[in-house]
Image (tube, rainbow, N blue to C red):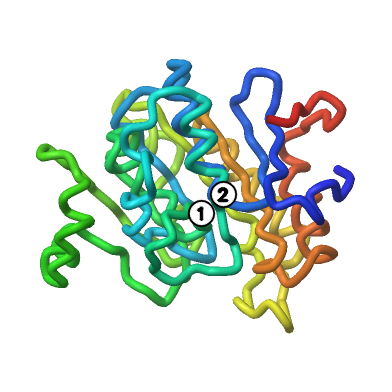
Amino acid sequence: MRREWEYEVTWKVHTQGKRISIMRDHNWAFAAWEIARIEKRIDEKSLLVHVDAHLDDVPDGVLIRNVIEAKTIEEIMEVCSGHDYLTCEISESNLMKISNFIWPSLARKTIEEVIYVSRDQSEVCTVAELIKHDAVEIMSKLPSDFSYNHKRFRTIDLFFDQFDENSFKEYVDGRTVILDFDIDIFNEADNVIYPVLTPMHEIREYTERLVNLYPWDLITIAISPVYCGGNLEAELILENVLKPFNLDSSKLKQW
């Protein structure tokens, strides 16, 4: 895949059936999920498997203007378009960032459970934590019957220690399921200046195992070049991540 995403933070493509979306920056995963629900390709209360170097579970995403109320594809795209990928701290800017796009889909009941596969040093943000820190404004945006379950695995290996094809299918229990994959998980250094990339054959093997674990209803893949260590590193990782998918890049469409 040519490096068309290098200078365009809104770059994103999908396959013809929209089952797989690839995006430069991760905030657009929210749009992919919500549009899929509008188009009835996934159901409400879906299960999300989030494989990423970062948790991306900053809850202030529910405060983004119109993010809960948006009903049309155009409105969904609009709430994503204010992305500011250089600023991740909590602010009053009403922007969707690469760190706060999961909670809006939780609040909209598109997602009810998240399995986090991440070495992030932070702990998962829970409703109990919001109550503890008196996050009244955020809590006010959640539905009265809000339900949020989560599991946490620090590595892909630990995730596969828990689940194989049969046990995962049983765990899914008829829900629609999203695989959300940030390729920066393969920068093992968590360092944007001196990255340490997972060996390429391991990247292909891990990706193939994830892809083959389940017939995912939706797959979102974020490139996040800054966190991969740079554009060259991201291009190399992406090339190896995409090999198990056998995608024809000429048939990918921008959206």
Image quadrant assignment for residue 128: bottom left
SS under mark 2: strand
Instruction: Say whether disc 1 or disc 2 marks the residue closer to the N-terminus.
Output: 1
User: At 56% across and 36% down in the image, what residue appears?
Assistant: 219
| Residue 164 rendering spot, x and y as whole percentages | 44, 43
Disc 1: CA contacts within 10 A as few (<14), some (14-19) or many (>=20): many
User: At 59% across and 62% down in the image, what residue appears?
Assistant: 85
Query: Is label 1 in contact with label 2 (beta carbons under 8 Å)?
Result: yes
Where, quadrant-wise, is the C terminus in this rendering? Answer: top right
Give left or right: position of 140 versus 38: left
| Residue 43 rendering spot, x and y as whole percentages | 36, 23
| Residue 253 position (above or below residue 184) | above
Task: Name the residue beneath numbered marker 2.
Answer: 181
Disc 2: CA contacts within 10 A as few (<14), some (14-19) or many (>=20): many
Task: Say what amino acid the circle numbered 1 marks.
Answer: Val
Give left or right: position of 74 versus 7: left
Marks 1/2: CA distance? 5 Å
Most distant residue in the bottom direction: 194
SS under mark 1: strand
| Residue 243 rendering spot, x and y as whole percentages | 78, 42
User: At 22% across and 60% down in the image, what residue appears?
Assistant: 126
Image quadrant assignment for residue 131: bottom left
Looking at the rendered structure, the number of numbered marks drawn on it comes to 2
| Residue 148 rendering spot, x and y as whole percentages | 22, 46
Residue 120, numbered label = none
Task: Say what amino acid the circle numbered 2 marks.
Answer: Phe
User: At 75% across and 66% down in the image, what residue appears?
Assistant: 199
Where, quadrant-wise, is the N terminus in this rendering? Answer: top right
In the image shown, does 173 or 71 lie closer to the viewer? Answer: 71
Task: Name the residue beneath numbered marker 1.
Answer: 51
Image quadrant assignment for residue 228: bottom right
